[in-house]
Amino acid sequence: MEAWIKNPILVILGRKIVMSFTAKTTSLRYAIPKFSVFLRFFSYSQNKNAKSNYGFDAIDDAVALFSRLITMHPLPSVVEFNMILGSIVKMKHYPTAISLFKQMGLRGITPSIVSLSILINCYCHLGHLGFAFSVLSMVLKRGYQPNTVTLTTLMRGLCVKGEVRKAVDFHDSVVAQGFLLDEVSYGTLINGLCKIGQIKDAFEFMQKMEGLMVRPNVVIYNMMIDGLCKDGFVTEACGLYLEIVGRGISPDIFTYTCLIHGFCSLGQWREVTQLLCDMVDKMVSPNVYTYNILIDALCKNRMLRKAHDMCNLMIERGQQPDVVTFNTLMRGYCLYNDVDEARKLFDRFVEWDIVPDVWSYNILIIGYCKSKRIDEALILFNKMHYTNLVPNIVTYSSVIDGLCKSGRISYAWQLFSAIHDDGPSPNVITYNIMLDALCKIQHIDNAIKLFNLMFERGLTPNVLSYNILINGYCKSKRIDEAMNLFKEMRHRNLVPDSVTYNSLIDGLCKSGRVSHAWELFYAMHDGGMPVNVISYNILLDAFS
């Protein structure tokens, strides 16, 4: 504040604004900024080390001050306007910043390179890349030199839109014109390439950095390690880890977590243990995310006791479990068909001040349904509505499946119809559940109507959808209709599996068309479909 009081120019400017407050009133929403906002703004404008929204508490304050400055005579410099625009961008109000920039143009304020860079940033965040590149053209026409941040922003905008190849081409063109890029620029491209699975190209970019005297930092190495691990190249990722250490770069928690995730996915526990020891040596503490990965891997490998021990260790080390931790352990117990232990964990959420999410409920509901305890699943399902949690399609599909398997098909149909009209739209899985239930009670014609409704709703039936109906037709001795569906699925480029063939072979044999069954058997074999023992048994039964 002292800096503002000692600056006579700012004092005069402040007086002009205060006088303009009393000179006229306006009905505009943002017309009158608080005087304290004005003081803070100019105090921050004099402090180059200030790291905030220049003293603005809300978007309204920033816009109100802009509205005052834009009506002053003479106008303040573009620098003050840039600071306001910058603060609005930090608050993520990109459309507002664009609108105010346009007002500057109407008042004849010539934008600086900073103004135009802010505008490019706004358009990129909004996904309007055409406008962003138009502003870049304006920058070049005015003789300005775009800085590294602006060029990186454009590359990031392209990557976010999925136009990674265009981002690479843009990189090549700006480098060819002599513009310098930094590790953030290359990190943006490497991250984009890794996300689309172009690990080789990402690695080449990392090598290209070296040639341009830009050294990869730990963030860039982490991107590469993460990409390699996700693609299953864990050994190569480990090689990069050794390179990091060899270069004197300190691996961070993200480095270790990526590698641990990669080795856990392969079940290589010795390597996981070695990495955990390395973390201890380098005084890098596992975080909640690291522990969750370990707990998840242990649960998936049916090492539930060790998963529980890992959770206890996590607590001992001062890391509080989160909803993901508990969900993972609950899912592990449900894999063991121990839904009661999963429920005990669910009831401990309150003890840890953790709010269950939709997936917490889904895990338990699925567990109850698989254990044929549909009533308990329904109680939990109804409880969701009282906790302001909105069930998703997984929730509904699980409950519908449980109802169907417990013989309550009319109740399942009511629930299915309810979400059809008002709720999360049923997906192919939901339809398949209902198709299977209808076929099992031999309501094949109703199943066909439902099958046709899938097309009307814009859904594409999968192989399982056809298998359910083909099996239903065969059980109802309607073999010709089953064969027509078989032809239809091939026409739709769906590849029949062994279940499809076995259903048809069984149906043909039971209807006395054994020669046709053999033809289909040979077609199955010639088409490269593995012939299993079920296929042979069906044909042998036909001759017994």
Image (cartoon, helix red, strand yellow):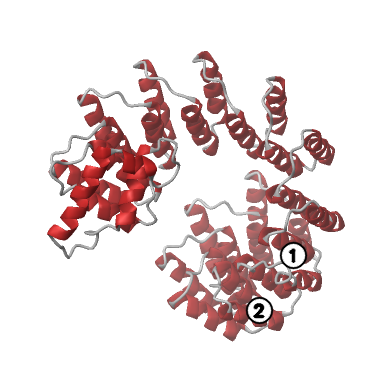
Residue at x 85% of width, y 56% of height: 309
Q: Nearer the viewer, residue 38 or 312?
A: 38
Q: Earlier in the sequence, mark 1 or mark 2?
A: 1
Q: Secondary structure at mark 1?
A: helix
Tell me where residue 173 appears, x and y as whole percent: 36, 21
| Label 1 neighbour load within 10 Å: few <14, some 14-19, many 20+ | many
State which quarter of the image contains the N terminus: top left
Residue at x 44% of width, y 23% of height: 181
Q: Which residue is mark 2?
A: 380
Q: Is residue 247 visible?
A: yes
Tell me where residue 287 appears, x and y as whole percent: 71, 47
Tell me where residue 183 appears, x and y as whole percent: 51, 26
**Disc 1 to disc 2, C-alpha distance:** 15 Å
Instruction: Determine the image quadrant of residue 228.
Output: top right
State which quarter of the image contains the C terminus: bottom right
Q: Nearer the viewer, residue 492 or 227?
A: 227
Residue at x 62% of width, y 45% of height: 527
Q: Which residue is mark 1?
A: 330
Tell me where residue 271 appears, x and y as whole percent: 81, 36
Q: Nearer the viewer, residue 334 or 9?
A: 9
Q: Which mark is residue 281?
A: none
Instruction: Determine the image quadrant of residue 333.
Output: bottom right
* Image height of 106 relative to 488, above or below: above
Q: Is residue 515 visible?
A: no
Left/right placement of residue 143 relative to residue 45 reads left
Proximity of marks 1 and 2: CB atoms separated by less than 8 Å: no
Residue type at mark 2 is: Leu
Q: Secondary structure at mark 2?
A: helix
Left/right placement of residue 527 relative to residue 120 reads right
Residue type at mark 1 is: Met
Residue at x 71% of width, y 69% of height: 349
Q: Nearer the viewer, residue 291 or 515?
A: 291
